[in-house]
Image: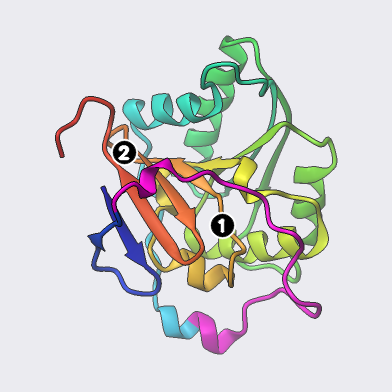
Amino acid sequence: MRRVPAPEVRPVESQPGEHHHTMSSLTGPPASGSPLIPAEELAAYGDLPCPAPHTAPELNALVGLLTPAKSRIETVAVGHSRDPASRAAADAFAAAWKARGGKVLARVDWPESAASWLRPARRLTAEEPDAWVMAAAPLGFAQLARRLRHSTDWDPARTVAFAALRDSRLPALAGPDTLHGLRGATAEGGTWAVRHRWVTSYPPPGSTA
């Protein structure tokens, strides 16, 4: 189990027992004013990686995060970047979720650069889904997440994401506690979670790593 502080990339050992923590929603959106990330902050983080194609273990782990014992999650909204890997991941999740009898209330995409990200933010939250699923590149998602927290009732603790968003720089880029509670799957079939400024990774079930 590893956790990585943003903006540092090198992981450090997590504290004992941290994998038992629970996720709770935040009490309010970021401070008033524009939620857009200033250009100088974007420049400080350099080039962020493009999403890689998702894997079958990753998809299975993501579905597993939404379907624990006694889960009441039935409806989801799926959001994704416009790159081919993110589109394919969103397609695969939507098909898997519908095959389980679940409902996809909305499917929303967004560009990596936009004037405000308000339209996709409102579309993602309009139907009040039980959960949100994100397949996205880090930069565009950071901007969207800031808009979601600023202008909607979106809850990161009810959101799961593909491995492309497991980037140690993402919590700092999105802003203080904007992503607290966000969880996701790794390409190997493990999981990860954002807790304040930390990204903590967990190995696949049965793994000794």
Front tag of 2 and 1: 1
Q: Mark 1 — residue?
A: 180
Percent across and percent down for residue 139 are 52, 65
Percent across and percent down for residue 82 are 57, 49
Viewer-nearest residue: 197 or 22 = 22
Give the residue displayed 32% in from the left and 58% down from the top: 3
How would you rate the neighbour count of disc 1 (Cα within 10 Å): few for under 14, some for 14-19, many for 20 or more? many
Percent across and percent down for residue 189 are 31, 32
Q: Report the residue that reaches farthest toward the right.
A: 126
Q: Marks 2/1: CA distance?
A: 21 Å
Q: Which residues are magenta?
A: 16-42
Q: Mark 2 — residue?
A: 187
Viewer-nearest residue: 198 or 107 = 198
Dominant secondary-structure state across the stretch colored magenta: loop
Q: Are marks 2 and 1 in contact (CB under 8 Å)?
A: no
Percent across and percent down for residue 5 are 36, 68
Give the residue displayed 63% in from the left and 66% down from the top: 143
Which amino acid type corresponds to the residue marked 1 in the rendered image? His
- Residue 141 falls in which quadrant of the image? bottom right
Q: How many marks can you see?
A: 2
Give the residue displayed 40% in from the left and 71% down from the top: 6
Q: Report the residue that reaches farthest toward the left.
A: 208
Which amino acid type corresponds to the residue marked 2 in the rendered image? Ala
Question: Does 124 lie within the magenta span?
Answer: no
- Residue 158 falls in which quadrant of the image? top right
Give the residue displayed 37% in from the left and 49% down from the top: 18
